[in-house]
Image (cartoon, rainbow, N blue to C red):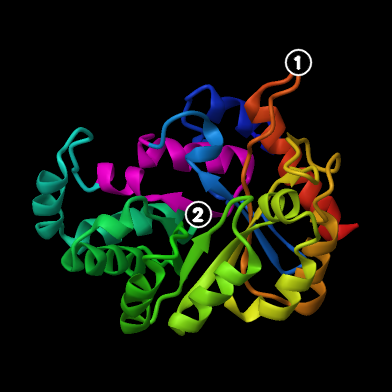
Amino acid sequence: MNYTRRDFTKVMLAGIPAVAWADSKPDSKWAGVQVGMNVPYNFGPGNFTPADDVLQKCIALGVSAVELRAQPVELFLGAVREATPDERRRWRKGVSLDKVRDLRRTYEDAGVLIEVVKWDGIYAMSDDEVDYVFQVSKTLGAKAISTEISVDGTKRIGQFADRHQLPVGYHGHAETSAAMFETAFSQAKCNFANLDLGHFTAGQNTSPVPFLTRHHTRITHVHIKDRKFNNGPNVPFGQGDTPIREVLQLMRDRRWPFQATVEFEYPVPAGSDRTAELARCMEFCRNCLLG
């Protein structure tokens, strides 16, 4: 029996193994630009979704690269979800990188690249734990790690990034100015930006394109979302002030190599659902790049 991708999506979202699709892989790299997703964040509340479930949903949506949160990674490695900082620190010392390689192989065999790993709470970690963060991320095949920006912590984390030769992309919000990113850049060669296009547009009341053009060699990935100026709301792609099309086409035309990572934050419209909206977000990006 032959399955279309629409058939495949239906059975995957229903939790039924789609073995008939085993000879095909997702592909969301269009015109040379890798479009990915922030997962499992995009799939709903909570980041402790099992890694296998995350992979299944990515395949169903045709997503071939991700920014993967660390929680599913550590669950796969055997972490206890409810643990004190000291318990988590001791557990991390005993993690086998062989099992990390197993997770990478599972994703890559399915056609999904783990290009960025997002770590929460990194500024409170011991030096040994920060080393662990970089070791695990590199073993997963990541091109970078990401974390929230903190002006008091970027110098220290940048030292680890330089030592491991793996960039760290600092994620900013509406209040994060260009100057804050530039300070981080000055502290370490591997201090980069995970530029959130929607937050920058809404919070700085200007296009992120000049910043991207000036600093494109210091970008790990951009978050694709649409917001209005003046700290306006998140809206469906194409309805806000964020120059999503312009950025994607610049990435295409200038061959900027970083991922365009869809981050879903607008309210699900009446009559729709999250899965349908995620598919629309991916299709919007595809049309921008191929149109």
Q: Which residue is mark 1?
A: 270
Prevalent SS, magenta region: helix
Q: Position of residue 112 (x, y in %)?
A: 51, 54
- Among all residues in the image, which is located at the extreme right? 291
**What residue appears at the point 71 percent right and 71 percent down from the top-left corner?**
212
Q: Position of residue 255 (x, y in %)?
A: 73, 77
Number of residues whose C-alpha sits closer than 10 Å to that of mark 2, classed few (under 14), some (14–19) or many (20 or more): many
Q: Which residue is mark 2?
A: 67
Q: Position of residue 148 (x, y in %)?
A: 46, 55
- Magenta residue span: 48-76
Number of residues whose C-alpha sits closer than 10 Å to that of mark 1, classed few (under 14), some (14–19) or many (20 or more): few
Circles 2 and 1: CB distance less than 8 Å?
Answer: no
Instruction: Look at the numbered disc 2 and give the secondary structure of its residue.
Output: strand
With 76 as the anchor, is 219 left or right in this view?
Answer: right
Name the kind of residue labelled 1 in the image: Ala
Q: Nearer the viewer, residue 219 or 154?
A: 154
Instruction: Look at the numbered disc 1 and give the secondary structure of its residue.
Output: loop
Residue 103, above or below 143: above
For the question of whether residue 4 can be seen, the reply is no
